[in-house]
Amino acid sequence: MQKPEPTLRTAVEDDSPAIRKLIFGILREYGLSPDPAETDSDLFDLENHYRVGWFCVMNQGASIIGTVALLPMDDDTWELRKMYLHPNWRGRGYGLILLDQAIAKARILGAKRLILSTASVLKEAIKLYKCRGFTPSSETPVADRCDQAWALDLQQSQASN
């Protein structure tokens, strides 16, 4: 019997331990350090931190296998953040589903531009960002573990779709 396709839903506070386990494990997989005191402090209070943003999880049954989030930076610019996918689920198109869902949600929330910070070692994620039209940005990455910034003009990318 084949497993059902993963589903997407908005995260709730009870998801926090599983989300931290997933994200911190992936960071360590790539030789990056979790930062619970600063960059990753949002993962300890999801509902408050994202009350004006959005945090989505991808579930396979009862297991959280992926995450993606959005936070407003100003009236027009939102940050795409916390996009992670369990290693067993990579290479099947689920990363694109997470990214496309976040881009669609950003448009619904009124974003005109998306920015993100990432680390060079996250090559699979960077490939996804490029595939959806993100381009390198001169902005300073928001996290110490990140060495790249990328941006997507949502108005321009929508006009070309």
Image: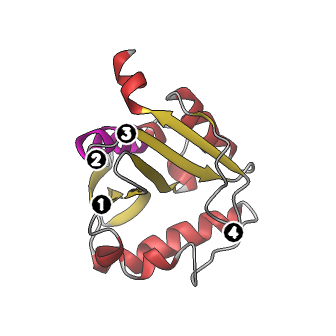
Q: Which disc, if any, is residue 103?
A: 3
Number of numbered callouts drawn: 4
Distance of label 1 from label 4 (alpha carbons): 25 Å
Quadrant where the image shows the C terminus: top left
Closer to the camera: disc 1 or disc 3? 3
Residue type at mark 3 is Ile
Whichever of labels 2 and 4 marks the residue nearer the N terminus, that label is: 2
Between 31 and 126, the one lying in front of the other is 126
For residue 158: magenta?
no
Say if the magenta span includes residue 98: yes
Q: Secondary structure at mark 4?
A: helix
Q: Does residue 69 sit above or below 113 in this rendering?
A: below
Q: Earlier in the sequence, mark 1 or mark 4?
A: 4
Tell me where residue 145 appears, x and y as whole percent: 71, 64
Which residue in the rendered view is the most extreme toward the front?
Answer: 75
C-alpha separation, residue under disc 4 versus residue under disc 3: 27 Å
Q: Which residues are magenta?
A: 97-109
Tell me, for residue 28, which label it has, or none.
Answer: 4
Marked residue nearer the N-terminal end (4 or 3):
4
Q: Check disc 1: other Cα within 10 Å, few if <14, some if 14-19, many if 20+.
A: few
Q: Residue furthest top?
A: 160
